[in-house]
Image (cartoon, rainbow, N blue to C red):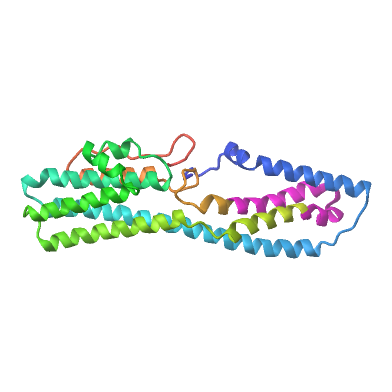
Amino acid sequence: MIVSKVPSPSRVVRAIWKPLTVLFVWDVIVTITYYVLPFSAPELPVTLFGTVLGLFLGFRSNSAYQRWWEGRGLWGLMINASRNIARAARNFMPDPEATELKRQIVYRQIAYVNALRCQLRRLPQDEEVLRLLPKHEKDLALQRVNVANGILDGTGRRIDEARRNGWIDTIQQAQMEAVLVDIANSQGGMERLKNTPLPFQYRFLPMLFTHLFCVLLPIGLVETLQFATPLGSTIAGLMFLAVLTIGDDLVDPFANDIHDLPLNAMCRTIEIDLLQAIGEKAPEALGPDKHGILW
C-alpha cells in the first residue's frame, strides 16, 4: 500500500507512459488527417458517450473500492480476534504448568496469520510460518490443502487439551472456541473476496468502452481544438484511463502489489501484540520502504 503523501513522479510515469504515448500518437494522426483531408464530426455523440462512460467507470471504481475496504475490515477483525485469543490464553490459564501450552497457542496464531497471508497472495509458505511451528506440526499443516485452516484446527485441539488437563473449564473453552469461530469467519470472508472476481462484464466492457472512447475522442474534438487536439484529447483520455486503472488496482485487495493491503505489516502488528501479551520480546513494527510503500 502506498503511504507516501507525495506521489512519486517516476512511479506515475511508469504506470501511464505506454497508454499515454499510444493515445498521443493517435491524436496526432487524427489532427494531421484533418488538415490533409478535412472532415466534420459532430461533438454531441462523443460528449454523451463520455458522460455515460464516466458514470460507468465511477460505479466500477466504487465496487472495486468496496472490495478493498471490506478486505481491510476483515483483517481488522482478524487483528482483534488474535489479540482476544492471546488474552484469553493468558488469563484463563495462570497455572505455571500451562505456560508452554499458552506459548504454543500464541505462536500458532502468529503462524496462522502469516500462513493466511501467503495463501491470499498465492505465495508458498515462507519462513515466518515455518519458524513458529514444531517440525511435526509443519509436516501436518503443510499436508493440508488449506494450510492456515490446518493450523487453526491444531489450535482448537490445544484448547481442548487445556480443558482435559483441568487448566480451563468448559465455559472458558466455549469462549475461546467462539474466538476461533470469529477467526474462521474472517478467513472465509477473505477467501470469498479472493476467489470471486468482479463479473466478466464489469472487467471487459469498461476496458472496451474506454479504449473506444479514446479512439473517437480526437475525431469529435479536432474541428474545435485543431492544433491543440493532441494535447486536449490526450489529457481527457488519460483521465478515463486513470479511472479504469484505479478499478483494476483495487479489485483484488490481497494481491502482492503496491496498491494492495499491507498484509506483512498487519501480520507483524499481530506478532508484536501477541508476544507482548505473554511477556516475550517482540520484533520492531514494519514501516514503509524507501519508496513509500508499506507491504
How many marks the image carries: the answer is: 0
Q: Residue at x 74, y 46 (%)?
A: 23
**Left or right: 211, with 253 as reference point:** right
Q: Is residue 73 visible?
A: no
Frontmost residue, 17 versus 150? 150
- Residue 56 on image: x %, y %: 63, 63
Q: Image quadrant of residue 139?
A: top left
Q: Quadrant of residue 126?
A: top left
Q: Main secondary structure of the magenta part?
A: helix
Check if residue 222 falls in the magenta segment: yes
What residue appears at the point 66 percent right and 40 percent down from the top-left corner? 17
Say which residue appears at 12% left-offset and 52% top-offset.
Answer: 161
The quarter in which the C terminus is drawn is top left
Q: Name the foreground residue: 286 vs 111.
A: 111
Magenta span includes 191? no
Question: Which percent across, then down, holds residue 284?
Answer: 30, 37
* Depth order, front residue of 184/265: 184
Vertical position of residue 146 compared to residue 206: above or below: above
What is the x, y in percent for residue 36?
93, 46
Q: Which residues are magenta?
A: 216-245
Res 124 visible: yes
| Above or below 257: residue 58 | below
Residue 54 quadrant: bottom right
- Please provide percent x and percent y for residue 70: 43, 59
Query: In this rendering, would 116 be left or right of 209?
Result: left
Q: Is residue 105 left or right of residue 33?
A: left
